Each structure stands twice: as structure tokens, then as C-alpha cells.
Amino acid sequence: MEASGAQLDREVSELSVPVPWGEIRGKVWGPDQGRPVLCLHGWADNCGSFNTLIPLLPKECRYLAVDLAGHGRSSHRPPGVFYSVLEYVADVLRVAGALKLRTFSIIGHSMGADIAGMFAALYPEMVDALVFLDSYGFLPTDPKEMYKVLRQGTDEMIQFEKKTEVKKRVYTHKEAVKRLLDANPTLSEQSAHILIERGLVQVEGGFVFSRDLRVNFKNSHRFSLEQSLEMQSRIQASVLVLLAQGGVQRRFSEPAQEKFTLALLQNFRDRNHKVVTVPGDHHVHLNNPEVIAPFVTNMLQTKVLSLSTRPEHKL
């Protein structure tokens, strides 16, 4: 593990992929000929979310951690455009096309896992392995409540567009770290400093958070449990679901939500996918990566690296 980490640390480089409205930025670890593994962070985070985990994973892989649109150093979407899972799925396809990736694995945390799950359902031939970090891969909505969520997301966008000027609050670096910790109690102070590295932009008088304010609006695309299970059944890749004891399981413990999550997990198990619960909270992969690294490593070694017939990929 230590040797792998040392080697990967030396090979980190910046990634930039052109998109119609700007660029998708990110970081790359590992050799040019390594098996490609796309890493998708959670809501309001950035690709720094994988800084502590990737050095513990197999050095034979090439890890492509992206800042999702509107996050980190990636461009914000054009005015009037929503942020939702389907738009992000299209971004994954753009990145894969630009990097000439025909088949790859995906590690997704939280919202990043929802994007990974939907992508693997729509493009099953492109994904050989999926790792969901503290996520079920899909987030169903009760059909009776769906209209409220969709209306809220639409109203938030329209009200935002009516504002003649939107000013972001300016922080000192210390204040920004405190603000991030206050908003994300599952982050350690070290993890907050890691995310801040790509999450701030320096301006006159201090720093502002780089993420687009529109990412805070309700997701305008929702799916029922029946639709989610159907999408889930389309996935051909091997799946590893890693849930934190203090993470989404606690958040979705209400009976109305629990019936959705139990159905999703049972469907994974019925299809011979692996579901594991580990100690930790929602950001365990960043705060304590050594807890989950052995599971992810085993997944990559047995489901990806052992397949010697797969063609090489070069970036």
C-alpha cells in the first residue's frame, strides 16, 4: 500500500476536458496505460474528495477524478440551465469521449454514485465495475411528493434568474474553512482543508466559494422506486455498495424512505452484488480512507485487473 501511494503521489497531474460551455477539470493519478477508473464526488464537494483514498488503491489503475460542472475548478453551466443527474450523465459521456474511454470503472460518492448508477444503466456496455460510497446508487422519490420537489426546483431557478445581481460572500481562508465545517459536520478539519484547495477562488478582500449557487437548487429530475429498480436492473457491471454506519442509512431511516432503500439494497443482493456496512460517517472515504480501501482494492483486483483480455486504454 505504501509503495502504491508513493508512486501515485508522484504521478498526479491536472485534467482538463473541453465542453460546450467551458471545461471539466480534475486530477489524474497513475500510469498512462493503467485501467481507467472515473471518480465522481458528492454534492458541493470536488475531486479533492478522493485525495486520501486513491493513494491506497491499486497502482495499476489510472484514476480520473473530475470536478463536476459547477464544482471545484470546472466551469459553471450556462445561464438558465439546471443541474441534475441526467445533465451530469451527459458530462460523463463527454469526458469518456474526449479521453477515448471505451470501458471503465466508476467510483462515486453520494451524488456522484447516483450519477454513476444512472450512467451504468444507460450505457451498461461502457462500465465494468461500480463502487458506491455511502449511496444506494439511486434516490427514489414518492410519486405523491414528486410534484412538490419538481415545483420547488423550478421556482428556485426562476427566482434566481430574476435577481439582477448575485453576490457571493467574501471570506478569509480561516472563515471559509469554518463555514465548510459548519455546513458539513461529517468532515474532519483536515478533510475541509483538502476540499477548500479546489473549492475557493481568490477575489479582492479574500476568497469566495467556487461552486455555482445553482447546485443548491432541488434536482429537477426525479424517479419513482419502480423506475429506479428498472434502471438498476439494466446495470451489467459488478457493484460494490459501501455504506457508512453514520451516513445515509441514518439519514434515510424514516419509514417512508427506508422502504425505498431496503428495496434497492435487496435488489443489489438478489443480483449477487456486494453490500457492506463500515464504521464511519458520510465522508468516511475522505476522513478515514483506510476503512474502505481494502474493499475497493479487492473489487478492482478481482473484477477489473484480473480480466487480462480487456484492451488497454491510453489518455
Image (cartoon, rainbow, N blue to C red):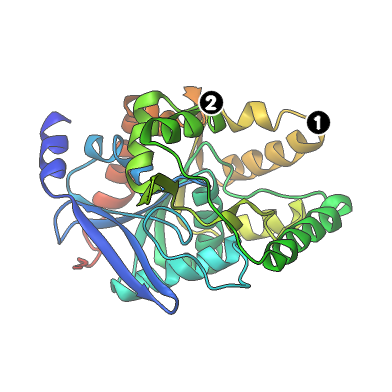
**Looking at the rendering, in which quadrant would you find the C terminus?**
bottom left
Where in the figure is residue 262, as x and y percent of width and height?
69, 36
Corner quadrant of residue 24:
bottom left
Looking at the image, which residue sits at the far bottom?
Answer: 20
Task: Give residue 281's position: percent from left, percent from top.
Answer: 51, 25
The residue under the point 33% across, 36% down is: 194
Determine if residue 202 is in view: yes
116 or 42: which is nearer to us?
42
Residue 171: x, y in percent?
44, 39
Q: Tag 1: residue type?
A: Pro
User: Horizontal placement of 275 versus 294: left or right?
Assistant: right
Q: Quadrant of the N terminus?
A: top left
Against 96, residue 46 (above or below) is above
Kind of residue indicated by mark 2? Pro
Mark 2 or mark 1, whichever is nearer to me: 2
Point out the residue furthest to the top here: 279
Residue, far right = 144
Q: Secondary structure at mark 1?
A: helix
- For marks 2 and 1 on the same chain, the one whose residue lies earlier in the sequence: 2
Q: On the image, numbered disc 2 is attached to which residue?
A: 185
Q: CA distance from mark 2 to mark 1?
A: 24 Å
Dot 2 falls on a residue whose secondary structure is: loop
State how many labels appear: 2
Q: Specify few, some or many for label 2: CA neighbours under 10 Å numbering under 14, 14-19, or 20 or more.
A: few
Q: Is residue 110 left or right of residue 8?
A: right
Write down the residue under mark 1: 255
Q: Are marks 2 and 1 in contact (CB under 8 Å)?
A: no
Eyeballing the image, is 194 above or below 27?
above
Q: Measured along the vertical axis of the image, is residue 216 above or below residue 273?
A: below
Q: Is residue 136 left or right of residue 141?
A: left
Q: Position of residue 286 (x, y in %)?
A: 38, 33
- Who's the residue at 32% across and 30% down the image? 294
